[in-house]
Image (cartoon, rainbow, N blue to C red):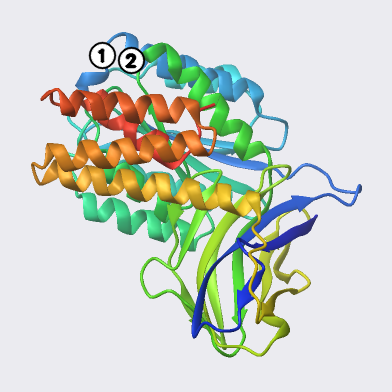
Amino acid sequence: MKVDLNLALNDSNLDAGQASNQRQLSISVSAIGTGTESAVPLNLCLILDHSGSMEGRPLKTVKEAAYGLIDRLNPGDRLCVVAFDHRAKVIVSNQVISDTESIKKKIDKLKADGGTAIDEGMKKGIEELKKGAKDTVSQAFVLTDGENEHGSNDRCIKLAVEAAAANFTLNALGFGDHWNQDVLERLADAAGGALSYIEHPEQAANEFGRLFNRMQSVALTNAYLLLKLMPKVRLAELKPVAQVAPDTIELPVQAENGKLAVRLGDVMKDVQRVVLANLYVGKLSEGIQPIAQVQVRYDDPGIGKTGLLSDPIAISANVLSAYQPALNPQVQQHTLALAKYRQTQIAEQKMQQGDRVGAATMLQTAAKTALQMGDQGGATVLQTSATQLQEGKELSEGDRKKTRIVSKTILQ
């Protein structure tokens, strides 16, 4: 597998008369095959809430969704299952898939009971994943329907960071309306995964399947963007880098050997990870001027190699005394996706402060942004929430969660 890396500026021309020009640098990363690859084994951990509130249809549909994934695993793939209430236990220890029926029978014995301690489930799940991590794509699905009443939310985030350091991706699935969207989003973001909302029990199989499809498309892991900025070019000080596809995530930046490193995690075939870097470019001489150089460091589990480097790709801008914009429509779309997310965040902050009018105004702005980028589904959800606030109504837990989800991605 090789890295496919593409760079573009939202406007490739710069004004020579300006002391500083702000530009968005779009960095698109995916994996492409060379024709000789074999499938990389999966190392999947299901971390499932079986607290008392999962009684009846919720737990039944989660079991059925788990069976569906088990049936899709290939020979050589690995699976482990952890269940938690206010404690956690390993239901299926990490093993290469062979006797799927015995695994299903173990899951089927799960009964709904007790409280909720997500961090206990995460701890045991990460321990099990480590047993099968070598030369695999390692991911966990963390599903819960409640608040972490018997655990520590801070510990959840620390465990997610630990998982990322071990090259594991954690996907968070909120079931029903009573889970904490802030905690699950932070958990997923910290470990490079997706946040998923299962509003109704019958949606469980589809959401499990959607995330499993994404996991199957992973070809390279533990990927980092390495950015080398040219003189007079710097990152913005506030929220300088964000992923905008397939989900929107604010990404931390760290210095590394004279470059800036940004962790991406998994790299997929045929699915681009798109990152926006917010740059400020100082006064430059007229003509074609280099702005930045980008490279990707990654692991290839298919051949058991780590710390591989893609070829460096450079991006330049045309500095003009008689400035005329040269806008890139695709980068503008990515910029709108990030704007939609951040506008929705501001709206949520205003709701928490009791400012309904301000929240409604920002949600309307986010809805208009969604329409600009052709996200009709997102626009409808955002505008519906804005209208409810304008009418003096409270947003239900379900409405709040749908609003968060559509801010981060485009509905499928």
Image coordinates of residue 30 in percent, x first then y, are 70, 52
Tell me the quadrant of the picture where the N terminus can be found: bottom right
Secondary structure type for disc 1: loop
The disc labelled 1 sits on which kind of residue? Answer: Glu
Tell me, yes or no, if residue 120 can be seen here: no
Q: Position of residue 322 (x, y in %)?
A: 66, 77
Q: Decide: few, some or many residues near mark 2? Use Cα within 10 Å; few <14, some 14-19, many ≥20.
A: some
The front one of 35 and 117 is 35
Q: Position of residue 125 (x, y in %)?
A: 41, 44
Q: Residue at x 20, y 40 (%)?
A: 359
> Going by the picture, which residue comes out furthest to the right?
35
Whether residue 375 is visible here, answered yes or no, is yes
Answer few, some or many: residues within 10 Å of disc 1's Cα (few below 14, many 20 plus, some between 14 and 19): few
Residue drawn at (57%, 47%), measured in percent from left and top?
333
Is 108 placed above or below 258 here? above
Left or right of 119? Residue 222 is: right
* Quadrant in which the C terminus is drawn: top right
As drawn, the residue found furthest toward the top would be 57
Nearer to us in this view, 256 or 139: 256
Q: Which mark is residue 55?
A: 1
Instruction: Determine which of the numbered discs, if any, sits on residue 186 in the image.
Output: none
Contact, mark 1 vs mark 2 (Cβ under 8 Å)? yes
Q: Whole-percent x and y of residue 264?
A: 56, 59
Q: Residue at x 13, y 37 (%)?
A: 356
210 or 42, nearer to the observer: 210
Q: Residue at x 63, y 20 (%)?
A: 71
Task: Report the amino acid beneath label 2.
Answer: Pro
Which label belongs to residue 58?
Answer: 2
Disc 1 to disc 2, how far (Cα)? Answer: 6 Å
- Which element type, helix, strand or loop, lies under badge 2? helix
